[in-house]
Image: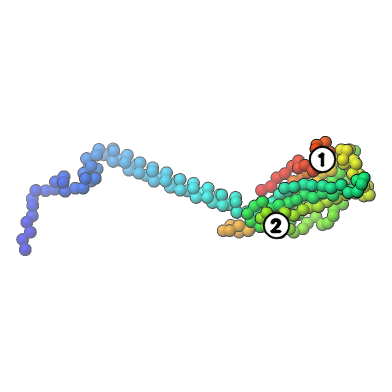
């Protein structure tokens, strides 16, 4: 079979339009075009990485328990009052359950420049399991009979009542495993504000 062969050579029309334009563009323009392509690709990669980091960070922050004191209340015992009972209410406001251990639960009274600790109602340590939204009280009390302080001295401000609570807690997070946290709070009974009661003066946690 005879196949005719043309000897006219290649013509511009033999190339696609995009290729013809690229051949016609100056060399420095083609170089800048490549640089811009690399820059845009790098920017897109950086945006994707930042989005992934923020998503992981949000998951890390939200998928955990948060334990702290959400309420402080007290009651006077007797008429006329001869004792006082109080409760510091812990609550899990996070999204995961947690095992809570009470490391320190101490109440002290300061009178005449001298500070003494009041007797505990129970052992300082203890385990509490808190589901999200669940609460648990830490109770304390004293009476005039123990001789450390009288209710009237606390109510009049001649004796200062101060409570210290320190807890540790742990919770499981998906894809992360067990994580451990701490919480510390100091509260004082304020006689000169209305309503009278315990007010937090120091607090920290992670």
Residue at figure coordinates x 21%, y 45% from the top left: 17
Furthest residue toward top: 192
Residue at the extreme bottom of the image, as rendered? 1
In the rendered image, the quadrant that contains the N terminus is: bottom left
Q: Is residue 24 above or below residue 182?
A: above
Image coloring type: rainbow
* In contact (CB < 8 Å): disc 1 and disc 2: no
**Residue on which the image places disc 1:** 196
Residue found 84% across the figure and 47% down from its top: 75
In the rendered structure, the answer to whether residue 132 lies left or right of residue 77 reads left
Please tell me how crowded label 2 is: few (under 14), some (14-19), or many (20+) other residues with Cα within 10 Å: many
Q: Separation of disc 1 and disc 2 at Cα?
A: 29 Å
Task: List x then y, in percent, for residue 175.
Answer: 56, 58
Q: Position of residue 2 (x, y in %)?
A: 5, 61
Foreground of the two, 170 or 191:
191
The percent coordinates of residue 146 (x first, y second) are 92, 50
Residue drawn at x 83%, y 36% is 192
Taking depth in this image into account, of 184 and 131 the one nearest to the observer is: 131
Q: Point out the tag, 1 or 2, that comes first from the N-terminus.
A: 2
Residue 130 is marked as 2
Residue 181 visible in rendering: no
Residue 187 shows in the view: yes
The disc placed on residue 102 is none
Q: Nearer the viewer, mark 1 or mark 2?
A: 1
Find numbered disc 2 in the image and state the secondary structure of the residue it sits on: strand
Q: Secondary structure at mark 1?
A: loop
Relative horizontal placement of residue 49, taking residue 140 as reference (left or right): left
């Amino acid at each position: 079979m005879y196949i005719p062969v043309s000897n006219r050579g290649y013509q511009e029309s033999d190339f696609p339009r995009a290729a013809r334009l690229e051949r016609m563009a100056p060399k420095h323009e083609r170089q800048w075009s490549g640089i811009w392509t690399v820059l845009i690709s790098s920017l897109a990669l950086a945006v994707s990485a930042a989005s992934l980091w923020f998503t992981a960070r949000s998951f890390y922050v939200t998928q955990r328990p948060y334990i702290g004191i959400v309420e402080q209340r007290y009651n006077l015992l007797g008429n006329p009052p001869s004792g006082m009972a109080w409760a510091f209410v812990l609550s899990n406001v996070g999204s995961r359950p947690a095992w809570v251990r009470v490391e320190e639960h101490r109440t002290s009274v300061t009178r005449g420049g001298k500070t003494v600790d009041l007797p505990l109602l129970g052992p300082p340590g203890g385990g509490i399991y808190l589901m999200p939204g669940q609460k648990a009280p830490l109770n304390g009390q004293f009476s005039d009979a123990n001789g450390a302080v009288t209710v009237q001295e606390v109510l009049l401000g001649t004796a200062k009542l101060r409570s210290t609570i320190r807890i540790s807690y742990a919770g499981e997070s998906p894809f992360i495993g067990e994580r451990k946290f701490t919480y510390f709070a100091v509260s004082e009974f304020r006689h000169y504000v209305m309503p009278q009661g315990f007010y937090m003066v120091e607090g920290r946690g992670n």
